[in-house]
Image: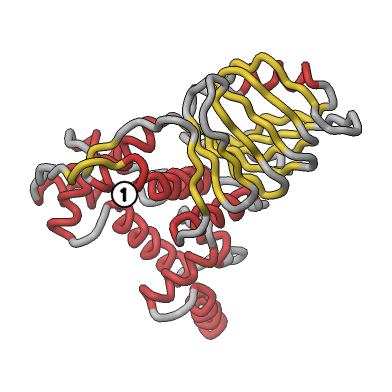
Amino acid sequence: MRPQSWETTAILTKEPQELLDHLNRHTRTALERIDPTDRGGRFSFSRVEVDLGRVRLAEARSTSVHMSGQASSLMTVIVSEQGQSLLKRRAGGEVVSCKGDAAIIAAQCDMIFQSSPDDVRYILQLPQRHIVELLQETEHGRVKELGPPLRLEFSTPVATSFHRAVNFIWRQQVVPTRQLRAAYDEILLHGLARLLAPVLLEGGPDRAPDPGPAHIHRARELIRAKAMEPVRVAEIAQELGVTARCLQSGFRKHLGTTPHQFLRDCRLDLAHRMLTAALAGQTTTSIAYDCGFGHLGAFAKTYRSRFGESPSQTLRRCRDRYLVTS
């Protein structure tokens, strides 16, 4: 279960009707029936959902259950960690399933969902437009809408990375700052976009216009000034009066990097300054979280690559210097 400090919506019930009312009220579904299918007559269902901003992440645990009705108006991603999940359209079509080896991805449709006994699954939901806009910004290609429910294998490095990110974020037991909440939201959104890119991208790339060096210089200033805040490229672009695709193109042309990589480097520099002047009680973990790094292992790796030492070594030198001068 998530710590109470997260913004959560939760239910634990043994009543199908109570579950039906909860899901229709909180998950943008229009379910008509929920039927227990456990041979022993058992029914138990728990669901905890975290709202990260654009992405909603939930964990559901249940006995065997059959649901039918209108799926969420959001894009829905189902990842079974234990047991098996099945999804198909009521009007007919292929049955799509996963059992820890794939993800089921669906947009709005009349559907039938069924889980195996003692099923544990993650559910991610978000407006499909966020994926479409991100792919347009980062891949410079034409993007199509998601069609029938599909299965995406977890056999590729991109899929494996996405699966690990979902597990990692769900298991975090830290008090979420605004920066961390935004960072986790960004990680899942970008991971899902990379996972869906081969399916949704069509045609050749579209060239985005160059916004010019003046806009890129101003964007760098804005990103540096907001490095301690939840920063989104689309908001920076809007403030400058250009599209996010233009900004991505300009950063690649003039700086040889991306806005997200530039933001990461700004946060690394900020973390380095904080570690070299750490106050009593500050730790590498607290400073990493304050600077918007949600994955401590990734933070340590990129920090060492940039500064030639680990965050803890930088902090230790700061402590040693304080002891010598005091």
Within 10 Å of disc 1 (Cα), the crowding (few <14, some 14-19, many 20+) is: few
Residue type of the residue flagged with mark 1:
Ala
Write the residue at 40% across / 44% down. Answer: 196
Residue 131: where, in percent of width, then height?
38, 37
Write the residue at 52% across / 48% down. Answer: 180
Residue 76: where, in percent of width, then height?
52, 33
Is 35 on the left-hand or right-hand side of 190? right
Residue 224: where, in percent of width, then height?
30, 53
- Which image quarter holds the C terminus? bottom right
Is 34 on the left-hand or right-hand side of 309? right
Residue 324: where, in percent of width, then height?
53, 85
Quarter location, residue 67? top right
Residue 52 visible, this angle: no
Is 303 on the left-hand or right-hand side of 30? left
255 or 118, nearer to the observer: 118
192 or 273, nearer to the observer: 192
> Label 1: which residue?
225
Write the residue at 37% across / 51% down. Answer: 227
Q: Secondary structure at mark 1?
A: helix
53 or 43, nearer to the observer: 43
